[in-house]
Amino acid sequence: MQQEAPAVDTTATDGPEIEIRGLHKSFGANHVLRGIDLDIARGEVVCVIGPSGSGKSTLLRCVNLLEEPSEGRVFVGGTELTDPDVDIDAVRRRIGMVFQQFNLFPHVSVRENLVLPQRRVLGRNKAEAEAVARKNLARVGLSDKSEAYPAQLSGGQQQRVAIARALSMGPEVMLFDEPTSALDPELVGEVLAVMRVLAGEGMTMMVVTHEMSFAREVADRVVFMDGGVIVEQGPAAQVVGDPLEERTRSFLNRILDPAAAEAPGARGEGPPAPPR
Ligand SMILES: Nc1ncnc2c1ncn2[C@@H]1O[C@H](COP(=O)(O)OP(=O)(O)O)[C@@H](O)[C@H]1O
Ligand SMILES: [Mg+2]
């Protein structure tokens, strides 16, 4: 018999890991999210694509309550985040977030970047936090950088540290907001490789990205957003390879072949680029 209820109920295994219902978000008069409904199953990898300003970041930020939804409900692991009585800190600990800007603490070592949040937020003791940090630095291939400072690392390495830091908190879900957009092209692959491994391990992931080859290879589902709504969604091969909607098609043409998309008369004509 269970003696003590866990701080967070992790026993609900039936429903989706992330459940978004009728989500709206306005900033003043700017109605950014206009009714988002989305379920993400445990272990599923969903890539969110769409033009700049379509509300992708706002959607992710509503999923861990960095933004408060104006309307609608969000559940993670069966717990309603939008319930006014929820222990929001407890729920947030279950959600890791990785940003375009790595947001590492510049004045402490890589190891301390991983250890400090575990001690402050989770109350882990030093030995335990250090052990978890070591394990996660190994996971992202940076065991040898533990005593380095962030500024001594490449952008790709800093982003891998940011991923290891998020993983050190033991999240059930990982949200990525354009994790490779600030990187030089030659550093993108090492970050995507780490994300690919995480996906293979069964992490539930919601990834805003413009990396269509990653979406094709790794995503179970691709969601195309425009103007604060989901325009279409489905398997990557379908949404990226053979979209149903004209808006999706013209977006993909623009990002897969920007030069052609800008040529006169090129917009929306012809099939999207072939699989890469
Ligand atoms: N904190 C904020 N305050 C005011 N407006 C915001 C805020 N965050 C986002 N917006 C606005 O919401 C819209 C969608 O932004 P965003 O979610 O960042 O889009 P995307 O990530 O798809 O580029 C934009 O018009 C942006 O200016
Ligand atoms: Mg964004």
Image (tube, rainbow, N blue to C red):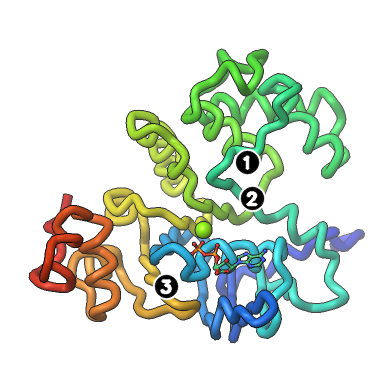
**Pointer 2: residues within 10 angstroms few (<14), some, or many (20+)?**
many
Task: First in sequence, mark 2 or 1: give its number.
Answer: 2
Labels 3 and 1: the sequence-earlier one: 1
Residue type at mark 1 is Leu
Q: Please report the residue visible at 59 percent of the width from the left and 26 percent of the height from the top.
A: 137
Along the line of sight, the residue nearer the viewer: 50 or 139: 50
Disc on the earlier residue, 2 or 3: 2
The residue sitting at 26% across, 80% down in the picture is 245
Q: Quadrant of residue 227?
A: bottom left
Q: Which residue is mark 1?
A: 167
Q: Is the C-beta separation of discs 2 and 1 under 8 Å?
A: yes
Q: Position of residue 141 (x, y in %)?
A: 49, 24
Q: In 3D space, how far apart are the residues under numbered discs 3 and 1 (Cα atoms)?
A: 27 Å
Tell me if mark 1 has few (under 14), some (14-19) or many (20+) residues whose alpha carbon lies within 10 angstroms of its own. many
Whether the residue under disc 3 has CB within 8 Å of ligand 1: yes
Q: Which residue is mark 3?
A: 225
Q: Which residue is mark 2?
A: 96
Give the residue type at disc 3: Met
Q: Residue at x 55, y 29 (%)?
A: 158
Residue lying farthest left?
A: 270
- Left or right relative to 276: residue 176: right
Left or right: where 150 falls relative to 254? right
Quadrant of residue 14 within the rendered picture: bottom right
